[in-house]
Amino acid sequence: MGFVNMTDIYPIRFSKAQLDSAPEKERLFYLMICQLANDLNCLSKLIIIAANPIKGHEIKNIASTMMCWFLVKLLAGKLNEGWELIKSDFFPLYKKYENEFSDEEKKKLKELKKYFGKKNIIYEMRNKFSFHADQKMIRHGYQILPEGDYVDFLSVYAGHCIYLTSETITTLAMTKMVESEDWKEAVNKITGEIMQVTGWMGDFILDFIKIFAIKYIAQKIDVKDKITFEDSPDILSIEIPFFSNPPNKFA
């Protein structure tokens, strides 16, 4: 499509009749994979933002780190479900689309096949931390918790409470999914791997969407409709405040 500037956005307008022109299986996969792309985009950007350091009391960074790990767990779950969707709904269509993908685009799908074809962090995270509490893993996290004093943070407003001890134990349990002597290094390995796979899946989805769009709904893009943002902030400068005044009805 010739996109150059990442701040340029191109509206693609189409009718339901154009969507109807696509075979149902392809249309449904397109709609489902577009929703997955939205979810991956939101979660991956929020993870980067939540990982940004925040000035002020240490508790602000503790809260951001907690939010970051929560989002990482959700992202792992979405990636695993996304791969299941690709396997079940796209692989039967692959022969029809194979010649439409470039060698570079096929490489991204091969990377995903290779990754999910063996034991991986995303599958482990999804089944033991993202949507389920694995008692065995939490027991192990508690067993390796160093001796010492720990602290939880309470507030009259439930939304401001941070149960740091539980978060620490869960994080220690998760770090045992990778080989590392240092828990901080393990955290970076886990996050880096999940973000890398997010990139592969996001690129594959965009490749498919472009091919589908050209086939059925958007043979031509009118560049005069282009939307450009000149004042977008640097993502590494954005903060998400965990502590904020609740709406009046909750105060």
Image (spheres, rainbow, N blue to C red):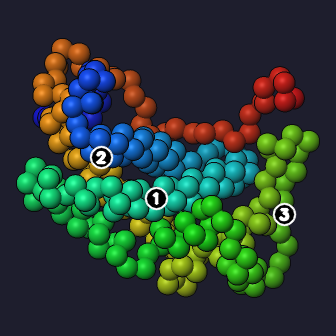
Which kind of residue does numbered mark 1 sit on? Glu
Q: Nearest to the eye among marks 3 and 1: give it.
A: 1
Q: With 31 as the anchor, is 225 left or right in this view?
A: left
Quadrant for the N terminus, please: top left
| Nearer the observer, 123 or 235 | 123
**Alpha carbon separation for disc pair 2 and 3:** 52 Å
Q: Position of residue 94 (x, y in %)?
A: 19, 58
Q: Where is residue 14, by image quadrant?
A: top left
Which kind of residue does numbered mark 2 sit on? Lys
| Nearer the observer, 26 or 54 | 26
Q: Position of residue 2 (x, y in %)?
A: 13, 34
Which kind of residue does numbered mark 3 sit on? Val
Q: Nearest to the eye among marks 1 and 2: give it.
A: 2
Quadrant for the C terminus, please: top right
Query: What residue would you read off at disc 3?
Result: 151
> Counting other residues with Cα less than 10 Å from the Cα at mark 2, is it few (<14), some (14-19), or many (20 or more)?
few
The secondary element bearing badge 1 is classed as helix
Query: What residue would you read off at disc 2?
Result: 25
> Counting other residues with Cα less than 10 Å from the Cα at mark 3, is it few (<14), some (14-19), or many (20 or more)?
few
**Alpha carbon separation for disc pair 3 and 1:** 35 Å
The secondary element bearing badge 2 is classed as helix
Query: What residue would you read off at disc 1?
Result: 81
Q: With 211 as the anchor, is 160 left or right in this view?
A: right
Decide which of tag 2 and tag 3 comes sooner along the chain. Answer: 2
Q: Are marks 3 and 1 in contact (CB under 8 Å)?
A: no
**Would residue 45 be visible to someone looking at this image?**
no
Q: Position of residue 154 (x, y in %)?
A: 88, 51
